[in-house]
Amino acid sequence: MYTNLKYNEMASETLENLTKGAFLTVKDQERLNTMIIGWGNIGVIWRKPIFTVLVRYSRWTYQLLEATKEFTVSIPVKDNLKKAVAFCGTYSGREYDKFKECSLTAEPAQLLQTPIVGECGLYYECKVVYQQAMEPALLNDEIRRSAYPEGDYHVLYYGEIVACYRKEIK
Amino acid sequence: MYTNLKYNEMASETLENLTKGAFLTVKDQERLNTMIIGWGNIGVIWRKPIFTVLVRYSRWTYQLLEATKEFTVSIPVKDNLKKAVAFCGTYSGREYDKFKECSLTAEPAQLLQTPIVGECGLYYECKVVYQQAMEPALLNDEIRRSAYPEGDYHVLYYGEIVACYRKEIK
């Protein structure tokens, strides 16, 4: 059912699809949420495959991630999830059960207790090994103005990729 | 002579080759140096293609990079540079002109004043848009022990990829 891959094999496809919106999912005990990311970095640091994601302090995901320190990234590879991406990128998990609202399937992950979004096709499971809140003064001025007009900076989470795989989507 | 590419098209090939050693080159006025990196992250952040590299405080490259805030990454795609990678990964640019010692060609970059290593094959030109020194307390314990037994932590440099391209190597 799943095809396991080396982290680098799907890097190009991941980055091509990531900017269209991917699901960053976190689960702390019974509290499950998914948010949309359009940014991320993939590579190898500290001899480990790493997926870096950015989460703003204001997000519900930030609170859950601080509790669990693990996340999954589910990347749509077809056009079947545009409405779900729009909804999950607009509303907060504090107010909506996004899986229910968008008829998304929370499928078990291979190694984490956090689920993946079954309908996507490309998956990463990550355990946070480093994190750091952004230091605004060190950021390029133009980026600071365009990406953070109201502050609300990101925390950078460096997740060790413990599994990555592909699933055929019909 | 050069084939220009979108940043994501060469991500998989880049990551596959990066762990074997790539040349991180910096040039501040007449001071030119190249060092070997085996770690790095590629992706998109702040709506920009980003290559993240790590440089320890102790490196000559750190001093040059702080002066210029730009760098090139030259990635060997064949086995022609193993000796050069070994030399440049062992000795400091404070003591050796590595280009001369290893008969490497400092070819002009497309957009930066920092050159590339002509013999490599895959290239990124990057302008630093964000940087941050690592915060040791936030790092996973096992990684801290294995990667930083003597301290000397890394500074993370987030370079906007302003050009990426390929060149045929004979």
Image: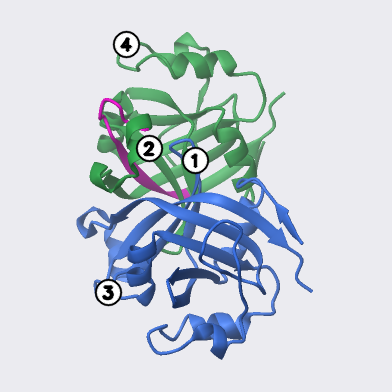
Chain colours: A green, B blue
Residue A164 included in the magenta stretch of the image = no
Residue A154 included in the magenta stretch of the image = yes
The residue that appears at 46% across and 69% down in the rendered structure is B26
**What's the chain of the residue with tag 1?**
B
The residue where tag 2 is placed is A143
Question: Is residue A18 shown left or right of residue A169?
Answer: left
Labels 1 and 4 in the same subunit = no
**What's the chain of the residue with tag 3?**
B
Q: Please name the amino acid that badge 4 sits on.
A: Glu
* First to last magenta residue range: A147-161
Q: Earlier in the sequence, mark 4 or mark 2?
A: 4
Say whether residue B98 is visible.
Answer: yes
Q: Residues within 10 Å of mark 1 (few under 14, many from 20)?
A: some
The residue where tag 3 is placed is B149
In this view, A119 is above or below B98: above
Residues at marks 1 and 3 touching, judged by CB atoms closer than 8 Å: no
In this view, A131 is above or below B113: above
Which of the labelled discs sits on residue B48, or is there none?
1
Which of the labelled discs sits on residue A124, or is there none?
none
Say whether residue A4 is visible.
Answer: no
